[in-house]
Amino acid sequence: MRKSVRTWVAITAVLFGASVCMAEQIDNPQYKNWAKFKPGTSVTMKMSSKMGETATESETTSTLVEVNGDKAVVETKMSMTVAGNKMDMPAQKQEIPAKIEKPAATPASTAPAATVTTEEVDAAGKKVKCNVTETTNTANGMNTKSKTWTSDEVPGMMVKSETTMDGAMKGTTTMNLTAMTIK
């Protein structure tokens, strides 16, 4: 009898400890966005970047392969041009879970300054209402300004982004939605 009580106490302690250690789970916004669409839905983004004297271009197509209550699976194909040489990268699949751990709060003192507005932009041949987030950050001798357009109407949410860096290294990166197929 005494042995079974000790066993029960030990099991209870383990289960209680496990529940205390589990992080709070929240809905994953990325999954929630992809789950609104059917498999075969895709988006294509074109990116241009110049860092110092090096320019690169890439095109990325992300296609929804599978979606269920637990996850979405997105396959990404990318081709990149560096110094005039085009390279096709192997396709990669990413599982996007329906639930994620709640992120820890970022102290206001370390978060970059940000403003959020809304704007309608032309993307992939249609008008898209976007949330626009502008951030500025200074770290390690670099000043970075970034502007990002996102929309729930677009699979993967990304519509456009522009980033400029100044300081120890100068550079610009732009990314634009060029094609979208909704299933």
Image: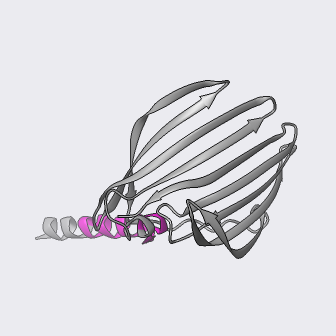
Horizontal side of residue 30 vs 38, given as left or right: right
Farthest-out residue, front: 125
Farthest-out residue, left: 1
Which colour assignment does the render follow?
one colour
Q: Residue at x 69, y 69 (%)?
A: 132
Report x, y in % for residue 54. 75, 29
Report x, y in % for residue 142. 85, 45
Q: Is residue 60 magenta?
A: no
Q: Quadrant of residue 73?
A: bottom left
Q: Residue at x 48, y 30 (%)?
A: 88
Q: Residue at x 55, y 42 (%)?
A: 59
Report x, y in % for residue 114. 76, 68
Tell me which segment is drawn in magenta: 10-31
Q: Quadrant of residue 158?
A: bottom right
Horizontal side of residue 62 vs 49, given as left or right: left
Q: Residue at x 24, y 65 (%)?
A: 11
Position of the C terminus by quadrant: bottom left
Report x, y in % for residue 1. 10, 71
In-front residue for pair 54/44? 44
Q: Is residue 17 magenta?
A: yes
Q: Can you see residue 6?
A: yes
Against 165, is 79 above or below? above
Q: Can you see residue 22?
A: no
Give the dominant element type of the magenta stretch: helix, strand or loop: helix
